[in-house]
Image (tube, helix red, strand yellow):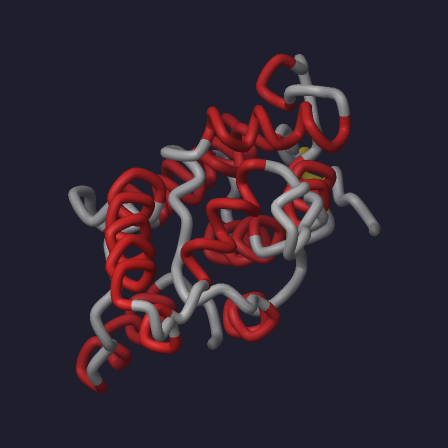
């Protein structure tokens, strides 16, 4: 996997802060609805590119490239389509189980490292061990429960226990459930991206 270190805007290179913790912070900032669109954009630029990013004359392009970097060079819908999960884990709530899972599979805790490229972290996260028999990392044991189709379980007791486990795991580790996006919300998002100079 090609791991970018720089982006180029108007013939000038801008160094990316590629540590995975910065990418996690940026994703949290981009999802923070308590601050304005401009504040989210400027905070993301600053986190990824520092003072040089804030001094860039073409910040719209810089933000576009920054978001592309955070999405691993893919489109948002491409990442979603590749995911088989029917829920969305909150990476900030999952630090402990991610650390345990990395130690179980790879023998290292990413949070104890001074540096780890965002792409390497994401690749290792996506390739954690899975098993139908439970002999896998804790993160994927949790995702296995979350992915269970409760309505297909015939035994009432097991179905109720599984449903209760899912509710508790979602409360502890998942992002708030998303409501279906309306046409108006979709248009509003499109206008936001256009105002930032990003084509979608």
Residue name at image x 47 percent, y 45 percent: 142
Q: Nearer the viewer, residue 105 or 46?
A: 105
Q: Quadrant of residue 151?
A: bottom left
Answer yes or no: is residue 38 visible: no
Up the image or down, 102 lies above or below 187; here it is above
Q: Nearer the viewer, residue 138 or 63?
A: 138
Q: Position of residue 38 (x, y in %)?
A: 28, 48
Residue name at image x 48 percent, y 31 percent: 47
Q: Quadrant of residue 110?
A: top right
Q: Is residue 177 left or right of residue 152?
A: left
All told, the count of numbered labels is 0
Q: Position of residue 183 (x, y in %)?
A: 22, 86
Residue name at image x 64 percent, y 35 percent: 16
Q: Position of residue 130 (x, y in %)?
A: 67, 50
Answer yes or no: is residue 22 visible: yes
Q: Position of residue 131 (x, y in %)?
A: 68, 52
């Amino acid at each position: 996997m090609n791991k970018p270190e720089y982006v180029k805007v108007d013939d000038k290179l801008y160094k990316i802060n590629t540590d995975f913790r910065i990418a996690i912070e940026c994703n949290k900032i981009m999802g923070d609805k308590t601050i304005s669109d401009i504040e989210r954009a400027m905070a993301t630029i600053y986190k990824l590119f520092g003072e040089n990013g804030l001094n860039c004359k073409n910040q719209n392009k810089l933000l576009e490239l920054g978001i592309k970097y955070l999405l691993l060079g893919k489109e948002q819908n491409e990442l979603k389509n590749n995911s088989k999960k029917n829920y969305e884990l909150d990476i900030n709530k999952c630090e402990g189980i991610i650390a345990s899972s990395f130690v179980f599979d790879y023998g290292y805790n990413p949070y104890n490292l001074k540096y780890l490229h965002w792409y390497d972290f994401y690749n290792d996260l996506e390739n954690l061990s899975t098993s139908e028999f439970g002999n896998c990392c804790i993160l994927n044991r949790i995702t296995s429960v979350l992915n269970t189709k409760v309505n297909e379980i015939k035994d009432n007791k097991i179905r109720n226990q599984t449903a209760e486990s899912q509710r508790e795991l979602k409360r502890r580790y998942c992002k708030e459930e998303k409501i279906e996006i309306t046409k108006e919300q979709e248009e509003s998002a499109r206008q936001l991206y256009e105002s930032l100079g990003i084509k979608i």
